[in-house]
């Protein structure tokens, strides 16, 4: 079985299953099986796969055809130009969440102490630590997520202090200059409308906030006043229907700003503690 044939067959299988971007997905899975980058295939289309490579490729295709997201199959996802290890215990970092980093760097690049609430894979905390050099803290209620974040911090040479707690209940009052968060914001009633890959494979604790989807925003907005130093910033990712509600929560804060993503959808909200 040559590389060219393996890719053609894999692409056809993924197309029949209505998997998005089937050719690229086949290349990513075969690259993972062979431990090479995708560009390798264009220079070596006639290379023969050995038995182990073919077995791994077949297993990865089977997982993807059964709905497992590609990122969980291969175990990593790029975020802000860096490679992050991911497992089904953490939410897969999305490109849209990079806007949280951009806004945080814009409003609070000189922050001395940063807190990431709901660290997950560590994408926000690790990135901000490496971009700013600030003392960085991160919390999560999930022990699995904290282990993944710890691994990513170590592999990327970031210094992140990890704390297992609910939101920021373990963080001292008046101790933080910048809080960032991509909190769960999907209402429970929207569960069945999610893509299968998201609904059935990503951790529900990182997806669903409660009946309205606003539950975590409500709690963060209240406790952030306790934790932030005067003039400190709160930067959060927005859900599709959460803008009006979160704007109301932060109406009495200073410097309120809403930043859209590349599609023009309100994606990040930021405000400064009075």
Image: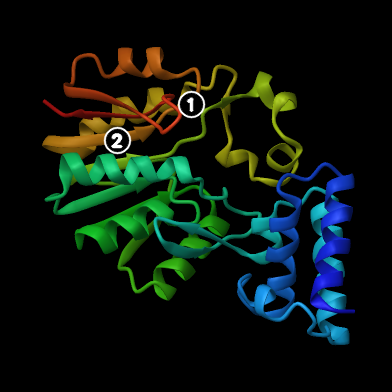
* 11 or 179, nearer to the observer: 11
Q: Is residue 88 above or below residue 75?
A: above
Relative placement, left or right, of 31 versus 273 is: right
Label of residue 212 in the image: none
* 203 or 259, nearer to the observer: 259
Crowding around mark 2 (Cα neighbors within 10 Å: few <14, some 14 to 19, many 20+) is many
Name the residue that disc number 1 marks.
239
Relative placement, left or right, of 11 versus 78 is: right
Residue 184 visible within the image? yes
The answer to which quarter of the image holds residue 79 is: bottom left
The answer to which quarter of the image holds residue 256 is: top left
Q: Where is residue 180 in the image (x, y as percent from the top left)?
A: 32, 42
Q: Quadrant of the N terminus?
A: bottom right
Q: Distance between the residues labelled 1 and 2?
A: 13 Å
Q: Residue at x 15, y 37 (%)?
A: 232
Q: Position of residue 33 (x, y in %)?
A: 74, 75
Residue 174 visible within the image? no
Q: Is residue 182 above or below residue 68?
A: above
Q: Residue at x 22, y 46 (%)?
A: 105
Q: Which residue is drawn at 20% across and 58% down?
A: 132
The answer to which quarter of the image holds residue 267 is: top left
For mark 1, give the secondary structure.
Answer: loop
For mark 2, give the secondary structure.
Answer: strand
Q: Which residue is drawn at 14% across and 54% down?
A: 112
Name the residue that disc number 2 marks.
235
Residues marked 1 and 2 touching at CB (< 8 Å): no
């Amino acid at each position: 079985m040559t590389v060219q044939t393996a890719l053609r067959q894999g692409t056809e299988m993924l197309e029949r299953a209505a998997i998005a971007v089937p050719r690229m997905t086949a290349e990513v899975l075969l690259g993972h099986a062979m431990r090479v980058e995708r560009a390798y295939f264009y220079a070596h289309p006639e290379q023969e796969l050995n038995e182990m490579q073919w077995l791994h490729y077949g297993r990865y295709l089977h997982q993807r055809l059964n709905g497992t997201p590609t990122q969980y199959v291969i175990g990593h996802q790029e975020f802000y130009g860096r490679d992050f290890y991911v497992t089904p215990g953490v939410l897969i970092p999305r490109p849209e969440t990079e806007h949280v980093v951009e806004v945080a760097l814009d409003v609070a690049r000189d922050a001395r102490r940063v807190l990431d609430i709901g660290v997950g894979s560590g994408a926000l905390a690790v990135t901000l630590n490496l971009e700013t050099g600030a003392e960085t803290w991160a919390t999560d209620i999930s022990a699995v997520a904290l282990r993944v974040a710890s691994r990513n911090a170590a592999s990327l040479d970031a210094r992140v202090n990890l704390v297992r707690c609910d939101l920021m209940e373990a963080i001292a009052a008046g101790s933080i200059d910048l809080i960032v968060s991509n909190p769960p914001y999907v209402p429970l009633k929207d569960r069945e409308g999610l893509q299968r890959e998201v609904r059935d494979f990503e951790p529900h604790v990182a997806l669903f906030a409660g009946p309205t989807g606003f539950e975590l925003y409500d709690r963060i907005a209240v406790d952030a006043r306790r934790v932030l130093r005067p003039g400190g910033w709160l930067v959060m990712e927005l859900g599709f229907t959460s803008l009006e509600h979160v704007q109301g929560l932060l109406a009495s804060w200073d410097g309120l700003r809403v930043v859209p993503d590349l599609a023009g959808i309100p994606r990040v909200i930021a405000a400064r503690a009075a």
